[in-house]
Amino acid sequence: MTARRRVLTGLLCGLLLGVSPALAHHGWRWTEAGNIELTGTIVGVNLGNPHGRLDVQVNDEMWLVEVGQPWRNERVGLTDELLSEGTEITAIGQRAADQSELRLKAERVMIAGNLYDLYPGRD
């Protein structure tokens, strides 16, 4: 292998290693099959791309609940004001396959009796 190929191969490997954790995080592969339902209070909010993240106090546990991308939330009427600290929320979705991680990817959320279906047709 020429020196130039070794350098290019090394750069490509470094790029892939740096990107792979981000790629693994997105999508649904990190979740387990089946849905669970959590009800708690939003105590922390980080909205934006690639998706919104809520810290939700559920009894004595702190859960990380991932909601949709800004455009997805907006499409179903889920505004930033609804996803504010102090709001009671019920999130329905898939939890992390790693049971030590209290994280849920929400398919639907309910706030003040209104259902917001972020991923219609997904069950």
Image: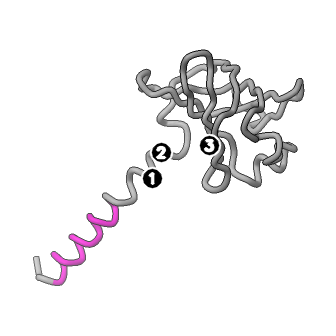
Estimate the x, y position of residue 47 in percent, counting from the top left: 67, 50
Helix, strand or loop under label 2: helix
Residue 53's mark?
Answer: 3
Q: Is residue 12 above or below residue 120?
A: below
| Relative depth, front residue between 94 and 67 | 67
Specify few, some or many for label 1: CA neighbours under 10 Å numbering under 14, 14-19, or 20 or more: few
Helix, strand or loop under label 3: strand
What residue does disc 2 label?
25
Estimate the x, y position of residue 50 in percent, counting from the top left: 60, 54
Q: Mark 3 is on which residue type?
A: Arg
Quadrant for residue 40, please give it: top right
Does residue 102 appear to the left or right of 35 in the view shown? left
**Cα–Cα span, label 1 and label 3:** 15 Å
Residue 6 lies in the magenta stretch:
yes
Q: Magenta-highlighted stretch: main secondary structure?
A: helix
Q: Dividing the image into 4 quarters, which one contains the N terminus? A: bottom left
What residue does disc 1 label?
22
> What stretch of residues is rendered in magenta?
4-16
**Cα–Cα span, label 2 and label 3:** 13 Å
Q: Residue at x 45, y 28 (%)?
A: 101
Does residue 92 appear to the left or right of 104 in the view shown? right
Q: Dividing the image into 4 quarters, which one contains the C terminus? A: top right
Q: Mark 2 is on which residue type?
A: His
Asked if disc 1 and disc 3 are in contact, CB closer than 8 Å, the reply is no
Residue 103 lies in the magenta stretch:
no
Q: Residue at x 56, y 34 (%)?
A: 64
